[in-house]
Amino acid sequence: GGGQASDAELCARFAAMTLGNFSLEETGRALIAAEQGIMPRLIEAVRGSDPDCGSFALLVVGNLFMITAAREALLEIPGGVDSVVQALYSVETQTVRFAVGAVRNFAADESCRAALLSVEGARPLLEQLTQHAHPRIRDHAAHALANLEGGVPAAAASFAQQAAQQPGFNSNQLLTDFAAYPVAGQA
């Protein structure tokens, strides 16, 4: 931090941002997910020193989690789940928002819940995030917790309704949030 980004860093940031936009649509997600070895490269960006690149990489990761093969790919990366959960501790609101959205989508898959629950402090942190100042973070955290419980749509809906009543809620945020959010147990 503090200095000007190198050409390589700017290129990586722009690539992650572009993939983030492509990942908002089903066709874009399918094309990205078909790229051999994409998940390890995205997790490498999440772990990297450029917070902007990492944030956009989390957006892509979270959207790719709508695809079973992408969730399975994360499980194969040593420390991959930990890297996504660690991003929840970021001081950057956008990073936290994309990380908690990724956790939300990952937790929708029953086969992924144990990996999330094995990360020390994950559940209490998600509970804390349901009280975050940013409404999208509160909503994602509430749905992530509901998904971890095997899908409790009524509880998630209640949290989402509470989030919508908070000051600053804007339901018209586009291109800066995840495309769709599966909640376990719902089609």
Image: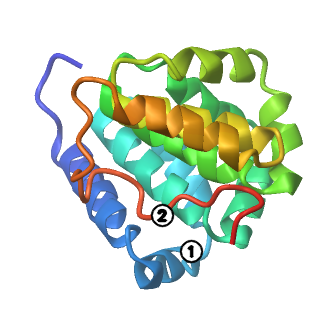
| Image x and y of residue 22, in percent | 34, 72
Q: What separation in Å lies between label 1 and label 2 (alpha carbons)?
A: 16 Å
| Image x and y of residue 131, in percent | 48, 16
- Closer to us: 89 or 78: 89
- Closer to us: 12 or 141: 141
Question: The residue under label 1 is which amino acid type?
Answer: Ala
Question: The residue under label 2 is which amino acid type?
Answer: Ala
Q: Specify few, some or many for label 2: CA neighbours under 10 Å numbering under 14, 14-19, or 20 or more.
A: few
Q: Which residue is drawn at 45% across and 58% down?
A: 60
The residue labelled by disc 2 is: 180
Q: Is residue 10 above or below residue 67?
A: above
- Helix, strand or loop status at disc 1: helix
Q: In this view, does 55 lie to the left or right of 143?
A: left
- Helix, strand or loop status at disc 2: loop
Disc assigned to residue 33: 1
Q: Which residue is drawn at 71% across and 59% down?
A: 71
Q: Quarter holding the C terminus?
A: bottom right
